[in-house]
Amino acid sequence: MTTSPLDLSFVRAQFPALAGDWIFMDNAGGSQTLTRVADRIRDYLLTSNVQLGASYAVSRQSGARVADAHADIAELIGAARPDEVVMGGSTTALLYTLSAAMAGQLRPGDEIVVTNCDHEANIGPWRKLEEKGAVIRTWAVRPDSLELALDDLEPLLNGRTRLVCVTHASNILGTINPVANIARLVHRHGAKLLVDAVAYAPHRAVDVAGWDIDYYVFSFYKVYGPHFAVLYGKHEHLAALPSLNHYFIDRSVIPYKLQPGNVNYELAVGCTGIVDYLAELGERCGATGPRRAKIVAAFDAIAAHEEALAERLLAYLRGRNDVRVIGHAVADRSLRVPTISFVVDGYRSDEVVSAVDASMIGIRFGDFYAKRLIETLGLAAVNGVIRVSLVHYNTLEEVDRLIEALGNAMPQRR
């Protein structure tokens, strides 16, 4: 089936913030929120804000709404069952929870592989396990391509490897890593794969079962929703973890045993609006059949539109001999998402961004908590990178306005 282009007038009408004067291009830091997400949060709080698990009707209704949220999110990510969905306040919090749960399963000398290009959320929790005797190995990007090569991962794997932690898409480079291929290699060595998808999930359909991922995590406030997050785990892996909840919450009670204090009910319910939006968007792009197929179609259209946005900006950056794009300088949707970082000769990154602020365009500079990568690249001295992070509600006209603002902010210095 050929997917129709995005109906941008429909898309933009779903995000009230876009009606204002600002252009939002710091979306990797946090996207704008769908009206239907905010409406569901409000409705839950005003009509069914009671504790779950009671016998009276409103409590049963509330419990059903939260259960529906687990089911919707499972469908969104391609999970086999709703209890494979663990919810929490943030990706960082969920990864520290998982690290704490896994700590008791590790023996001194067991090995964990992390990268040098991830957000610190997917490095720090694992490095802390060195205190328990774990050995941490680093899979580094290649200096020339800034890519993670499978040939570099294989020598790091051995019979003591228990976990490999990698980003699905770098929040600096925008590079998409081939997680299905990584999973096959990791599993061949008897280890598990954990994928941080915070920078990937806003841009592409997720298929955790199809890719055979063991653990997968991302935050909804990057995916048009509230400050909330999801951790997927294969059922057998979650079942093997200890309970981090009260002593009377048995390890068999999944996912509650990994949700101490339980979840934020209203935010969980709000996230169902994301799934409905993507399904409706897929319908508008010509998809029929199951809701999951409509979600996939929506992301196909999103990827095509975002590729055009990224190419417009990257073409401008490639045309300047004083600009270095950090990552792929082409917009190929199979290689990258439209999170574009660069530095400019003769300018600190904060200088450029501060000047662009005056044009009422929100972009950003810094290390974006991928501090180890910025230090490896020697970019701390210029205050990190300039990052423009686009999503599907951005337009070519907005990119043109950004290009004009960048031209004014960073005239070439001879």
Image (cartoon, helix red, strand yellow):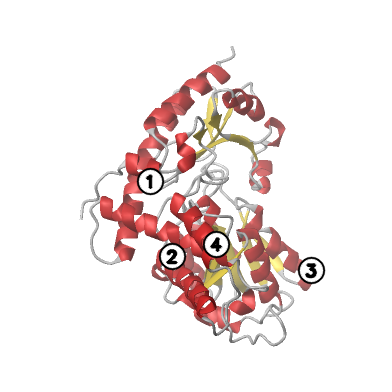
Where 330 falls versus 215 (above or below)?
A: above
Choose between 68 and 241: the one closer to the eye.
68
Secondary structure beneath label 4 = helix
Q: CA distance from mark 3 to mark 2?
A: 33 Å
Q: Which residue is mark 1?
A: 333
The quarter of the displayed image where residue 104 is located: bottom right
Q: Answer with mark 4 or mark 2, whichever residue precedes in sequence.
A: 4
Q: Amino acid at mark 3?
A: Glu
Pick the quarter of the image with the C terminus. top right
Taking the image as shown, residue 372 lies to the left or right of residue 302, namely right
Q: Residue 411 at what x, y percent from top left?
A: 55, 16
Per the model, the C-alpha gap separating discs 1 and 2 is 20 Å
Q: Which residue is mark 2?
A: 77
Which type of secondary structure does the marked residue at label 1 adopt? Answer: loop
User: Residue at 42% of width from left, 75% of height from top?
Assistant: 80
317 shown above or below 71: above
